[in-house]
Image (cartoon, helix red, strand yellow):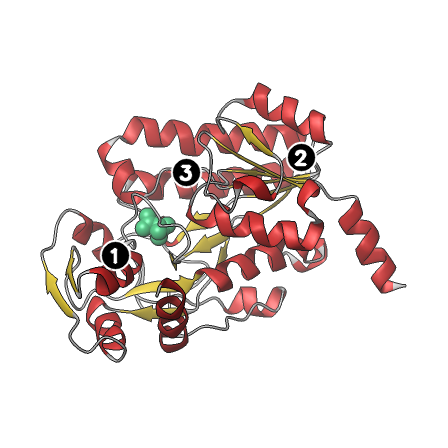
Amino acid sequence: MLLLIIQLYRMNTVILVLGASGQIGTELTQKLRKIYGSNHVIASDIREGSEELMPSGPFEIIDATDKIKILETVKKYNVTQVYLLAAMLSATAEKMPEKAWNLNMNSLLAVLDLAKENHIQQVYWPSSIAVFGPSTPKINTPQQTIMQPSTVYGISKVSGEYWCNYYHEKYGVDVRSLRYPGIISWKTKPGGGTTDYAVDIYFKALEDKKYECFLSENTRLPMMYMNDAVNATIQLMQAKPKDIKIRTSYNLAAIDFTPKEISEEIKKHIPDFQISYQTDFRQAIADSWPSSIDDSEARQDWKWHHDFDLQSMTEDILKNLK
Ligand code: AKB
């Protein structure tokens, strides 16, 4: 009986992923297609995606701020859920604040409005550890704490969290969100983030056996392997509404490490790997963020757990990249 209900739910679910060609979108779309079926997951972005993504199911060119185009696509495929992953990340957003604000906020408001108008039933929108700032407690940062971000990206994420909560409280919109830490992947590289060094380092270790890091050796940041991030996202979206107690955004954590610690881990596989340090403006962004996150509410409310630590993640990445 339960299996039949799950199957019916999956048959009636059609997902639109906005920002599907990006780092998280690429892998999340593929996983959603495995679960719901290729034709039930519509990928979209302002540019085409990877060679693996494009032939795997329907794809539409969509600017995530274009509410009319999103609505047309929702109607064309009878979409029931939207995963909004299009965003400008922390480092790029500092260089073009207005563009970042427009993309990050207008896309969210467009999708929340579509849910308010009953065109879609569920929304996923990622927040980030960037909602925290220099005055936030740095170690085991709690769910409820001071949030005074010092970046444009962080300001857009805090504002977005409160819009999500507002649409839920006021209009009953089923919007769910996670505060992602730095996400580490090997299939698609991230672009424009402060935690991107932890992806680049693996590519450079294999290509050149050396890496110049733009953060200092002891900068500790919360991080997570892509497999865990994708699982957390889908688990949150599949949880029963009564188990979702936070409608701003859930703290989410797995591992935390410094550039020195990740380089030591890589050296276990590539003994002559060398890391050097040349910090830039991204150091100040990293210094404003927590070192570790307390995600006990996510673990309690919808039974989140992570599978990968620094060691198992490094093994998996290097094996796949080789
Ligand atoms: C970034 O570095 O900007 C992102 C993030 C932590 O949200 N990876």
Question: In percent of the image, x 42 and y 48: which residue is there?
Answer: 23
In this figure, which residue is indicated by the disc labeled 1? Answer: 197
Question: In percent of the image, x 65 and y 54: which residue is there?
Answer: 34
Which quadrant, please, contains the N terminus? bottom right
The reply to whether discs 3 and 2 touch (Cβ–Cβ < 8 Å) is no
Residue 23, above or below 277: above
| Chain-order first, disc 3 or disc 2 | 3
| Chain-order first, disc 2 or disc 1 | 2
Check the image and name the residue furthest to the top. Answer: 68
Q: Who is closer to the viewer here, 129 or 50?
A: 50
Residue 233 visible at all? yes
Which quadrant, please, contains the C terminus? bottom left
In this figure, which residue is indicated by the disc labeled 2? Answer: 171
**C-alpha span from label 3 to label 2:** 24 Å
Left or right of 24? Residue 68 is right
Q: Who is closer to the viewer here, 24 or 123?
A: 24
> Nearer the observer, disc 1 or disc 3?
1
In this figure, which residue is indicated by the disc labeled 3? Answer: 87
Question: In percent of the image, x 35 and y 71: which residue is there?
Answer: 314
**C-alpha span from label 1 to label 3:** 19 Å
